[in-house]
């Protein structure tokens, strides 16, 4: 069974604080994607990481892919209320294009 | 680019009726589309993989006869929920792989309520 464990599942913090979301697996992924989903909407792709050890930055968001391509993290610096949403990680095993999804992290940033 | 348009966004139907959900890739050809179901506050659950011109591949536990998938062209896939029951009420989302970006683009989802 291919699993992608995402933690924490719920996080509520004050504006200005930093946070990190983790996704871990025993499977090796050809790529790993991070999505953000608003209520009643489909997920929106934030970033794709492909190379082991890769780090990508998107303004205050920093994404890292583990050296072995089994894990990834999302770090948000100085969180804003606009960052509130459901964050999902998804790993691609390659070939069949199917994604293995994390359980999601419900993030609430309080003003 | 890489936009998937999903319709309708919301539908309410009576028990026993059928509902069709459409997913169109607007600016690219999607040979493969994925249909997901999402329960409140939960992650996405893959229901089936839709391949243009061939039969869909269903995940274990998903009833093929209840969730009919048709992928007749490179830009359109449909999911029909047949003989809907209240337990079929959920948020259904389609997606397609956008080859140029190692990512998947998603439709905006359909909120199905069966009464």
Image: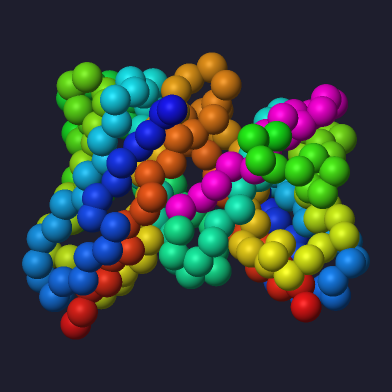
The residue sitting at the right extreme is B17
Q: In which quarter of the image is the N terminus of chain A?
A: top left
Q: In which quarter of the image is the C terminus of chain A?
A: bottom left
Color encoding of the figure: rainbow
Q: Quick check: A106 above or below B1?
A: below
* Residue at the image position 81 percent from the left and 36 percent from the top: B71
> Looking at the magenta stretch, what is its main secondary structure?
strand
The residue sitting at the bottom extreme is A111
- Where does the image place residue B13, in percent across and percent down from the top left? 82, 73
Q: Quick check: B64 above or below B10?
A: above
* Residue at the image position 87 percent from the left and 35 percent from the top: B72
- The magenta segment: B43-57
- Is B56 within the magenta? yes
Q: Horizontal placement of A43 versus A103: left or right? A: right
- Where does the image place residue A50, in percent across and percent down from the top left? 33, 25
* Residue at the image position 61 percent from the left and 48 percent from the top: B36
* Residue at the image position 22 percent from the left and 65 percent from the top: A11
Q: Quick check: A108 above or below B80?
A: below
* Depth check, front residue: B19 or B96: B19
Q: What is the number of callouts on the image?
A: 0
- Is A64 within the magenta? no
- Where does the image place residue B113, in percent across and percent down from the top left? 71, 73
Residue A56 shows in the view: no
* Depth check, front residue: A84 or A99: A99
Quadrant housing residue B59: top right
Residue B84 shows in the view: yes
Q: Horizontal placement of A35 versus B36: left or right? A: left
Quadrant housing residue B63: top right
């Amino acid at each position: 069974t291919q699993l992608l464990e995402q933690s924490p599942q719920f996080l509520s913090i004050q504006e200005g604080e930093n946070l990190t979301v983790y996704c871990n697996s025993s499977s090796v992924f050809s790529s790993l994607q991070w999505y953000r989903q608003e209520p009643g909407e489909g997920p929106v792709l934030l970033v794709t990481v492909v190379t082991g050890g890769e780090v990508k930055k998107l303004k205050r968001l920093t994404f890292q892919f583990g050296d072995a391509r089994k894990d990834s993290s999302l770090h948000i610096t100085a969180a804003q209320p606009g960052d509130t949403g459901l964050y999902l990680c998804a790993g691609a095993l390659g070939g069949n294009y199917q994604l293995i999804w994390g359980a999601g992290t419900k993030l609430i940033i309080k003003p | 680019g890489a936009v998937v348009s999903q319709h309708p966004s919301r539908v309410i139907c009576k028990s026993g009726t059928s509902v069709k959900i459409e997913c169109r890739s607007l600016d690219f050809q999607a040979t493969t589309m994925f249909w997901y179901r999402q329960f409140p506050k939960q992650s996405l659950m893959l229901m089936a993989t839709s391949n243009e011109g061939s039969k869909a591949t269903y995940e274990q536990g998903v009833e093929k006869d209840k969730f009919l998938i048709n992928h007749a062209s490179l830009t359109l896939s449909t999911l029909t929920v047949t003989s809907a029951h209240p337990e079929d009420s959920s948020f259904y989302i389609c997606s397609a792989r956008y080859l140029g970006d190692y990512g998947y683009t998603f439709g905006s989802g359909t909120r199905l309520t069966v009464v």
